Amino acid sequence: MTIVSVRLNKQEEKAINSYATLTGQPVSQLLKQALLREIEDKVDYTIGVEALEEHEKDLQTFTIDEVAGELGIEL
């Protein structure tokens, strides 16, 4: 297990500790969750940008009915 230290100013420390008290969660858990959400958001954004760029290369689109029919799904 790795230990990471984070330097906070007094306002940041007060805000984070207040939020930890409000939620009943340890500060370490809150910080870890926030960082993992940030990473997930960045990955999702990157995938979305790549998908948009790929779509712009071929603007062909399909309706939901066309996709369902192709997959043999009845809506």
Image (cartoon, helix red, strand yellow):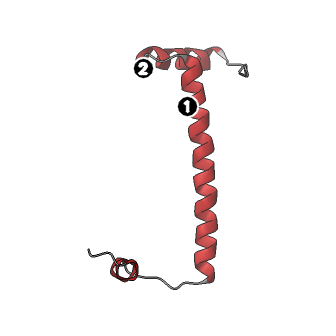
Among the 4 quarters of the image, the one containing residue 51: bottom right
Three-letter amino acid code at disc 1?
Gln
Q: Which residue is mark 2?
A: 23
Among the 4 quarters of the image, the one containing residue 6: top right
Q: Residue at x 73, y 19 (%)?
A: 5
Q: Residue at x 43, y 16 (%)?
A: 24
Q: CA distance from mark 1 to mark 2?
A: 13 Å
The relative height of residue 12 versus residue 38 in the rendered view (above or below) is above
The relative height of residue 41 versus residue 56 in the rendered view (above or below) is above
| Proximity of marks 1 and 2: CB atoms separated by less than 8 Å | no
Q: Quadrant of the C terminus?
A: bottom left
Residues packed near mark 2 inside 10 Å, few (<14), some (14 to 19) or many (20 plus): few
The relative height of residue 41 versus residue 69 in the rendered view (above or below) is above
Q: Position of residue 56 (x, y in %)?
A: 60, 79
Q: Does dot 1 land on a helix, a strand or a loop?
A: helix
Q: Residue at x 43, y 82 (%)?
A: 62
Q: Residue at x 56, y 18 (%)?
A: 27
Q: Position of residue 7 (x, y in %)?
A: 72, 19
Three-letter amino acid code at disc 2?
Thr
Q: Which residue is mark 1?
A: 33
For marks 1 and 2, the one nearer the N-term is 2
Q: Position of residue 15 (x, y in %)?
A: 53, 19
Which residue lies most toward the front here?
72
The relative height of residue 58 versus residue 29 in the rendered view (above or below) is below
Q: Quadrant of the N terminus?
A: top right
